[in-house]
């Protein structure tokens, strides 16, 4: 029996009369790479906010790392890592200062942060960049560093919101190797992306459309079901069929 | 021309669609006027005064008794000599000192007149005016009673009013001119600089630049709506101060409006200039508020009389245009003087305007950096 | 074919950083020309030079037969430009945005409605909605309509598909294709390698330099080695094993498989043996055709 670290049951989120999340139910297992796909405005961001404890569900039961998103959002925040494309690190702090800062935010001991910091810089071959400002680093390096910082405190789950947008193809692949390696350590990866080839890298993917999860399976499973060759075609088929007006 | 009108139309849409902009445009001026107006025109009640009685006779006791029993004043203390006058006024609690000259009663009876000095704290001009007005009124009343009591020759107590710290009482009715000066620079400089930098921040400026619109059209298109609305504001403020506080414009209203237009135009050019320097809205707001609003409040003579400032501040205030407009508007509104008395300040404002426009055109880039 | 944009040896520096180095290309009338590369490659800077918003430090450029440095006013009449962030007025409605841009360019919505009908019809039902309240895909369509409203001869689109979902992206490219009938030249940039296939010709750009220019087919054919597509249920294990193999020239995850090139003289048999020895099970391996992204990776690695 796989161990579920995220378990969502009948999640509904409404904004006024608008239903952003319409009865979502799914589970994400420990150490899994879970791809969370959907069209623009399908409700991904809303769901992601609820899962990361930033927003409360209107109804339904959401357990993340064993804690209830409605009652214990603060405990959820302690047990997850979060990284998004736009904001990740402070541009006007150095690499080391950023690492120390985030370690401190998650209440890690100073000595432990220092140890992890040096370990991380070595692993990323980042030693020469340690005392440089983030704004001086190329985008690819920044994203890799942001990911490493998001898992610095060894969270049970890390949420990645379009982590590789605009990143060059080599760095993108190096980034995914880091994801694989992190998942192999038992940390669950919950990732959104617009790159459909990246969706293929995931263990399982869900596809949202108009507030609902309309497909959830392994990439191969979905391809077989829709009798197509790529996740992209699956995605296009699903979203097109669900489109009413736009 | 159609292009240009389309642009102006768009600006009006921005303004009327944004609640906050409307509040700043019309809410703040009205609130400011009412706020200043009411704070300033409160009635006098139990104001603390001190008495320096160098005569100590029956008449002085009677007069000071009348002053205190009027209900408007409380006697804080009796002073012993002139040195104390400065001390108590500086303490700020005492609003005025009433000084009876030596042999007050004797002189009144023998010479038919005696003088009483009223010394008030001119650094609070409004309070000073009120205290002295009330005091002189009480003294006149006292004179009437004296005359009624004595048959024949009239006895006269002559009040001599003196202001400490601000002798010519320049703060009188300063708030309406001050508010107009402040509001215009706030709306014009702040709002225009914000609306232009907003286009930079949202990336729409890039598209405008890559359009056949000329820089001058873009700038004028931004400026004209605010010019119109600011002018409406001036009229609104004047109307409010006239209707609510009965404050008339003593001089020519036409001259006042023309001068206001000049000042608005100058503030708008300043706003454009700020926007050519500022990279984003945050910077524009910072420059407008810290760079313009604070000096306007502190250095233009709006609150603190320029004459009483240390030399260095007087020089610094010389480079802030609001200072000159305050002189112009005060002369026209309060003193009722004509253009001959304000042409120098008008010329200075005109020069500022031309300089701002010149710098703006030089700074406005048809390209990105 | 008439040349619409002609650049020779363009260079641009920001302080010490050189954003563009020796860029040369020609774009013909009616072409859909794509600049493909990651963020920071210099695409936006190049587009700003084409639209006369920036002046290059080196080299020569002609746009629609004019010099963007001295004759920018001529160029600006005939250009439609969509900057990286959709430049819409968030507090104006869909229709107001469109009408505004129409007046600015001295035309009306009615006059050129035929041009944008296919695109605008998607969002017309929402024409009273504020632009700020639109979804990403709708914003993108509105921004394109605004850039097209004056029937420009050259349409410059800076990353129009970034942050937009795969379906909207695909629809967007279909719309661009439809614009061909009006003989509008389209210059477009994107970080998505797969979108290269939708262009007539593309230029691969990285670190301010052009890696290669050509039709998508030519660029793929430029891939010089035999390319294998390898799969296994345990992808990460497979990847690590291939990385540690001495005969591997390059190995990259690619969708559901791993793309592999081998060093000279290394046989497929050798690699199968190695994988078996490393305990990777269920391996499939077949030759495959290189895509634009394979070529991009090859060119990047060569540098």
Image: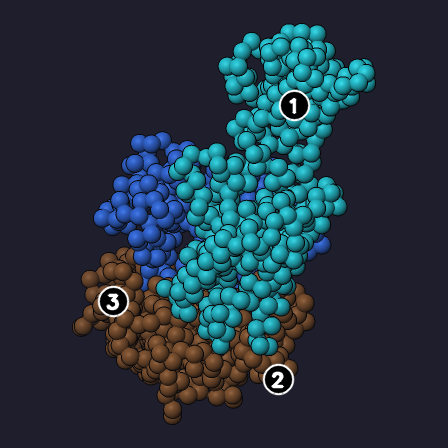
Chain colours: A blue, B cyan, C brown
**Quadrant housing residue C109:** bottom right
Give the structural element (helix, strand or loop) at label 1. Answer: strand
| Tag nearer the camera, 2 or 3 | 2
Q: Where B267 sits versus C291, above or below?
A: above
Give the structural element (helix, strand or loop) at label 2. Answer: loop
Q: Disc 3 designates what residue? A: C301
Q: Disc 2 designates what residue? A: C111
Give the structural element (helix, strand or loop) at label 3. Answer: helix
Q: Is residue B126 left or right of residue A86?
A: right
Q: Disc 1 designates what residue? A: B159
**CA–CA distance between discs 3 and 1?**
97 Å
Most extreme residue toward the left is C265
Q: Is residue C286 left or right of residue B95?
A: left
Report the residue at 23% width, 65% height from top. Answer: C248
| Tag nearer the camera, 1 or 2 | 1
Q: Is residue A88 visible?
A: yes
Residue B68 image position (x, y, % from top left): 71, 15
The number of numbered discs placed on residues in the rendered structure image is 3
């Amino acid at each position: 029996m796989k161990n579920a670290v995220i378990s969502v049951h009948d999640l509904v989120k409404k904004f006024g009369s608008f239903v952003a999340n319409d009865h979502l139910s799914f589970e994400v297992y420990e150490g899994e790479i879970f791809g969370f796909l959907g069209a623009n405005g399908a409700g991904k961001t809303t769901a992601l906010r609820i899962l990361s404890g930033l927003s409360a569900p209107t109804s339904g039961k959401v357990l993340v790392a064993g804690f209830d998103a409605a009652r214990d959002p603060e405990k959820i925040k302690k047990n997850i890592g979060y990284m998004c494309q736009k904001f990740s690190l402070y541009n006007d702090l150095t690499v080391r200062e950023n690492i120390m800062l985030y370690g401190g935010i998650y209440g890690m001991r100073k000595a432990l942060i220092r140890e992890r910091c040096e370990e991380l810089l070595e692993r990323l071959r980042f030693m020469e960049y340690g005392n440089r400002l983030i704004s001086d680093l190329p985008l690819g390096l920044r994203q890799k560093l942001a990911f490493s910082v998001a898992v610095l405190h060894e969270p049970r789950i890390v949420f990645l919101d379009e982590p590789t947008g605009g990143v060059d193809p080599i760095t993108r692949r190096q980034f995914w190797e880091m994801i694989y390696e992190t998942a192999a350590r038992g940390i669950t990866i919950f990732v959104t992306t617009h790159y459909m080839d990246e969706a293929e890298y995931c263990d399982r993917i869900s596809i949202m459309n108009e507030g609902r999860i309309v497909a959830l399976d392994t990439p191969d499973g979905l391809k077989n079901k829709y009798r197509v060759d790529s996740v992209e075609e699956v995605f296009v088929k699903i979203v097109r069929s669900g489109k009413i007006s736009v | 021309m159609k292009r240009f009108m389309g642009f102006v139309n768009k600006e009006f849409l921005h303004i009327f669609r944004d609640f906050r902009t409307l509040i700043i445009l019309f809410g703040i001026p009205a609130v400011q006027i009412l706020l200043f107006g009411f704070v300033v025109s409160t009635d006098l009640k139990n104001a603390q005064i001190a008495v320096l009685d160098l005569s100590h006779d029956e008449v002085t006791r009677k007069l000071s008794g009348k002053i205190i029993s009027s209900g408007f004043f409380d006697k804080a203390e009796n002073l012993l000599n002139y040195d104390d006058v400065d001390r108590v006024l500086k303490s700020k609690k005492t609003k005025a000192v009433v000084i009876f000259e030596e042999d007050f009663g004797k002189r009144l009876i023998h010479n038919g007149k005696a003088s009483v000095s009223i010394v008030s704290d001119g650094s609070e001009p409004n309070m000073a005016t009120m205290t002295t007005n009330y005091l002189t009124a009480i003294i006149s009343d006292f004179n009437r009673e004296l005359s009624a009591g004595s048959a024949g020759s009239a006895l006269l107590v002559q009040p001599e009013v003196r202001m400490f710290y601000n002798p010519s009482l320049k703060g009188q009715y300063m708030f309406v001119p001050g508010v107009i000066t402040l509001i215009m620079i706030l709306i014009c400089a702040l709002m225009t600089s914000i609306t232009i930098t907003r286009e930079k921040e949202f990336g729409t400026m890039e598209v405008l630049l890559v359009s056949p619109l000329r820089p001058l059209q873009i700038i004028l298109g931004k400026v004209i709506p605010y010019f119109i609305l600011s002018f409406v504001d001036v009229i609104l403020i004047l109307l409010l101060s006239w209707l609510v506080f009965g404050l008339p414009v003593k001089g020519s209203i036409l001259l006042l409006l023309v001068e206001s237009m000049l000042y608005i135009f100058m503030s708008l050019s300043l706003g454009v200039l700020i926007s050519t320097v500022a990279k984003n809205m945050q910077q524009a707001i910072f420059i407008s508020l810290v760079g313009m609003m604070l000096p306007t409040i502190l250095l233009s003579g709006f609150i603190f009389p320029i004459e009483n400032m240390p030399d260095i501040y007087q020089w610094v205030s010389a480079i802030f245009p609001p200072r000159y407009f305050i002189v112009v508007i005060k002369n026209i509104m309060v003193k009722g003087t004509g253009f001959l008395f304000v042409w120098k300040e008008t010329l200075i404002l005109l020069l500022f305007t031309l300089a701002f426009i010149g710098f703006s055109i030089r700074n406005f880039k048809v390209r990105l950096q | 074919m008439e040349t619409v944009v002609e650049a020779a040896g363009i260079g641009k520096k920001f302080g010490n950083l050189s954003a563009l180095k020796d860029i040369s290309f020609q774009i013909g009338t009616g072409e859909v020309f794509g600049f493909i590369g990651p963020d920071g490659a210099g695409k936006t800077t190049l587009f700003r030079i084409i639209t006369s918003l920036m002046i290059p430090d080196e080299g020569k450029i002609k746009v629609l037969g004019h010099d963007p440095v001295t004759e920018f006013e001529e160029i600006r009449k005939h250009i439609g430009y969509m900057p990286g962030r959709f430049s819409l007025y968030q507090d104006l409605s869909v229709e107001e945005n469109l009408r505004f841009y129409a007046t600015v360019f001295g035309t009306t919505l009615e006059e050129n409605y035929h041009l944008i009908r296919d695109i605008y019809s998607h969002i017309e039902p929402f024409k009273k909605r504020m632009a700020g309240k639109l979804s990403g895909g709708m914003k993108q369509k509105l921004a394109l309509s605004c850039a097209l409203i004056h029937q420009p001869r050259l349409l410059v689109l800076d990353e129009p598909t970034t942050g937009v979902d795969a379906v909207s992206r695909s629809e967007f490219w279909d719309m661009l294709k439809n614009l061909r009938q009006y003989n509008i030249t389209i210059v477009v940039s994107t970080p998505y390698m797969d979108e290269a296939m939708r262009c007539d010709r593309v230029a691969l750009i990285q670190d301010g330099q052009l890696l290669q220019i050509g039709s998508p087919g030519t660029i793929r054919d430029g891939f010089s080695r035999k390319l294998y597509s390898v799969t296994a249920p345990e992808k990460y294990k497979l990847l690590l094993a291939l990385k540690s193999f001495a005969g591997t020239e390059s190995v990259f995850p690619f969708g559901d498989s791993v793309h592999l090139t081998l060093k000279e003289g290394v046989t497929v048999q050798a690699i199968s043996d190695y994988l078996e020895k490393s305990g990777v099970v269920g391996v499939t391996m077949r030759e495959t055709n290189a895509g634009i992204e394979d070529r991009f990776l090859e060119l990047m690695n060569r540098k």
